[in-house]
């Protein structure tokens, strides 16, 4: 589970990954030479002050961006060279996203929001609805299926978002400040939910700057100036 | 699966549009007016030309009409002197036409004489038409009673006459007139048949008052009444000699009509020193009328097209605004795994739903405008099914054309930027 282990259970492996932006004449290394591996079932918090490169890190891990150099292997596939369509395909099959601001689609009902990944997977409406209802129940929201996101509280919206992230049954869930827009009590509930999912075998990688939230994870990667400063491991 | 996704995208499109009902409705208006003006203009144009076309078509698209006309120079001369003028088609012209052109099926010669007809005490100014059995074939008038002129009447030089329904009634005769002896001029003719007089067929023959026509065999007309026509006006007497007033030439098939007409023109030029005839080809008139109609439609269509263009630009404008507003939605969809192509399809279908819906509303309005025009102004209008199909097609095309740019723009958003968008 640590940076250097390289067993078959690894779902994510980064080898000397760099992400460089050009700002005017100057090159900015948002992520500089990061090598990490995460094995199946890991629960990791990526921490660091703003500008430390943790967001860029999450974008890279989430296949929303490609590294400038280095290798990034997810589900035995090196994504560094993949085109946009193939990246979408990887996201669709292997990844689930949970955002700080929930990012539910306002014109869709709770059920339809949860079923969104299934739409792109080409599931039928009926099959998707059944599966989405099961997921809603799993996150404790079975009564609000026909509601619009705007009719829900923040905590409920985040539950919907988590259910949506689970719809395609991904190995990895990426969470970007999942409690950032919630009060402490609700945030705790969401973290409990994520811990449950981790116990059920999901690999969770979470970006946060709140130490109390990060304590839920079993591993903490501290970043500074685009580099991995240190790794805390509970085990 | 692809078709299935289209259905769901349509559903999704409707949902997104319903989110801003007023905005979607206002955007749709451009297409509504565009499409309704396309339909209204086409139907009014169609209605205007339809009558003209129908009239020309009645003359027969395989026919060529050659009429005698008094040449201009003779007209002037006749006013000065009172001598006899000769003009018009000759008996020989009929034979020449038949013998020269293999494409000719048959020719109906027409010779007109004005004579008084008398049956017992009743008299009526008749237009006596000397012709052949071919006339009844070419003009296709239905017999009410008796028979038409037959070949044996010509051979036997029979003094027989076929009256029109109207003329027969004026002479106080119905079907019972068959067998009566009608006096025309100074000779007696046996009434053998009555044909229906159809006012709308007036265009077929030179003069419109054909209701009082009396058809007799051409050779009888020639021997009984001769070729000289005397017209008396106050103080002067005008004499003219005309052999035939009209030749109706039927051509075997439509393809040969124009070539034959040109041939006949060249032939007549050779035998007539003066321009004392006029050739009209209904098929050419028909083509001309159709070309006029086509141009008319193009002009009207372009005007309507401008309003569609304006409508389309309105749609594009709103869709661009919508893409900006929904940047986050696009980011989320991309993060979840939607491909660029799928985002393009989503927005394109949404635009097409808007424009096609506008198209259908436009058809509703567009069909009712011609109906109202016909109802209140009596102007004929024809809504063709083609114009409806065209309108739906156009409104969908507007959706594609003006939806493509916003859709591509949506798809090309960077998912990271899009998710960060406030």
Image (cartoon, rainbow, N blue to C red):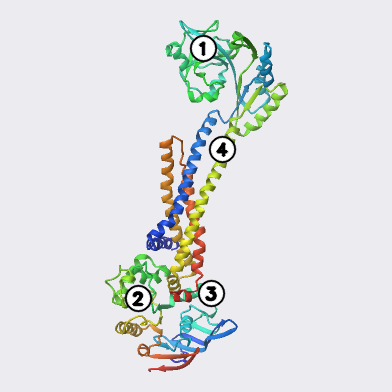
Q: Nearer the viewer, mark 3 or mark 4?
A: 4
Residue at image location 47% in from the left, 53% down from the top: B395
From the image, tell me which residue sits under label 1: B125
Crowdedness near tag 4: few (<14), some (14–19) or many (≥20) residues, C-alpha within 10 Å: some
Q: Nearer the viewer, mark 1 or mark 4?
A: 1
From the image, tell me which residue sits under label 3: A83
**Residue A163 - label:** 2
Residue B235 placement, left or right of A184: right
- Residues flagged by tags 4 and 2 on a common chain: no
In whole angstroms, how far apart are the C-alphas of marks 3 and 2? 28 Å
Q: With respect to residue A9, does A108 lie above or below?
A: above
Which x, y percent locates residue A234?
38, 94
Taking the view exactly as shown, the residue that stands out farthest to the left is A143
Callout 1–callout 3 Cβ contact below 8 Å: no
**Residue B290 - label:** 4
Mark 2 or mark 3, which is nearer the start of the sequence?
A: 3
Element type where label 3 sits in the image: loop
Callout 1–callout 4 Cβ contact below 8 Å: no
Callout 3–callout 2 Cβ contact below 8 Å: no
Q: With respect to residue B331, does B49 lie above or below?
A: above
In whole angstroms, how far apart are the C-alphas of marks 3 and 4? 56 Å
Crowdedness near tag 3: few (<14), some (14–19) or many (≥20) residues, C-alpha within 10 Å: few
- Residues flagged by tags 3 and 4 on a common chain: no
Toward the viewer: B412 or A138?
B412
């Amino acid at each position: 589970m640590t940076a250097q282990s390289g067993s078959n259970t690894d779902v994510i492996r980064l080898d000397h990954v760099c992400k460089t932006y050009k700002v005017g004449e100057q090159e900015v290394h948002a992520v500089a030479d990061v090598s990490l591996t995460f094995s199946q079932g890991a629960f990791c918090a990526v921490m660091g002050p703003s500008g430390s490169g943790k967001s860029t890190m999450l974008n890279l891990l989430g296949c929303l961006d490609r590294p400038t150099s280095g290798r990034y292997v997810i589900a035995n596939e090196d994504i560094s060279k993949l085109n946009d369509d193939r990246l979408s395909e990887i996201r669709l099959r292997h990844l689930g996203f949970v955002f700080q601001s929930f990012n539910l689609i306002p014109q869709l009902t709770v059920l339809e929001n949860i079923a969104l990944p299934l739409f792109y997977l080409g599931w039928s409406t009926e099959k998707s609805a059944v599966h989405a209802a099961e997921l809603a129940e799993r996150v404790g929201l079975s009564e609000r299926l026909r509601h619009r996101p705007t009719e829900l509280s923040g905590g409920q919206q985040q539950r919907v978002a988590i259910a949506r992230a689970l719809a395609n049954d991904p190995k990895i869930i990426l969470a970007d400040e999942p409690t950032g827009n919630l009060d402490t009590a609700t945030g705790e509930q969401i973290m409990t939910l994520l811990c449950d999912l981790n116990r059920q075998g999901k690999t969770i990688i979470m970006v946060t700057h709140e130490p109390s939230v990060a304590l839920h994870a079993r591993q903490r990667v501290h970043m500074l100036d685009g580099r991995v400063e240190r790794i805390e491991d509970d085990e | 699966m692809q078709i299935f996704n289209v259905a769901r995208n349509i559903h999704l499109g409707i949902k997104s549009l319903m989110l801003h009902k007023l905005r979607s409705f206002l955007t749709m208006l451009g297409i509504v007016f565009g499409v309704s003006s396309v339909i209204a203009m086409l139907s009014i144009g169609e209605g205007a030309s339809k009558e003209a076309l129908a009239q020309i078509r009645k003359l027969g698209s395989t026919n060529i009409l050659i009429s005698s006309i008094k040449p201009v120079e003779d007209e002037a001369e006749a006013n000065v002197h009172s001598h006899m003028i000769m003009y018009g088609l000759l008996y020989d012209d009929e034979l020449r036409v038949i013998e020269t052109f293999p494409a000719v099926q048959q020719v109906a010669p027409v010779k007109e004489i004005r004579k008084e007809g008398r049956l017992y005490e009743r008299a009526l100014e008749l237009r006596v038409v000397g012709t052949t059995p071919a006339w009844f074939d070419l003009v296709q008038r239905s017999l009410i009673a008796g028979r038409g002129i037959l070949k044996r009447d010509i051979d036997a030089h029979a003094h027989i006459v076929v009256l029109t329904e109207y003329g027969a009634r004026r002479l106080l005769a119905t079907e019972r007139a068959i067998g009566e002896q009608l006096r025309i001029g100074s000779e007696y003719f046996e009434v053998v048949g009555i044909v229906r007089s159809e006012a709308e067929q007036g265009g077929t023959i030179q003069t419109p008052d054909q209701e009082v026509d009396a058809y007799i065999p051409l050779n009888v007309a020639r021997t009984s009444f001769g070729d000289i026509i005397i017209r008396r006006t106050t103080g002067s007497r005008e004499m003219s000699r005309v052999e035939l007033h009209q030749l109706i030439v039927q051509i075997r098939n439509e393809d040969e009509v124009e070539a034959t007409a040109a041939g006949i023109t060249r032939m007549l030029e050779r035998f007539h020193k003066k321009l004392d005839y006029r050739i009209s080809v209904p098929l050419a008139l028909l083509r001309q009328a159709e070309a006029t109609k086509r141009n008319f439609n193009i002009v009207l269509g372009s005007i309507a097209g401008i309003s569609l263009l304006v409508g389309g630009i309105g749609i594009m404008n709103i869709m661009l605004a919508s893409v900006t507003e929904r940047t986050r939605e696009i980011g989320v969809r991309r993060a979840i795994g939607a491909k660029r192509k799928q985002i393009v399809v989503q927005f394109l279908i949404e635009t097409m739903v808007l424009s096609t819906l506008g198209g259908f509303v436009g058809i509703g309005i567009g069909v009712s405008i011609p109906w109202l025009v016909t109802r209140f102004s009596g102007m004929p209008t024809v809504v063709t099914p083609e114009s409806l199909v065209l309108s739906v097609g156009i409104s969908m095309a507007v959706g594609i054309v003006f939806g493509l740019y916003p859709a591509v723009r949506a798809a090309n958003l960077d998912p990271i930027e899009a998710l960060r968008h406030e």
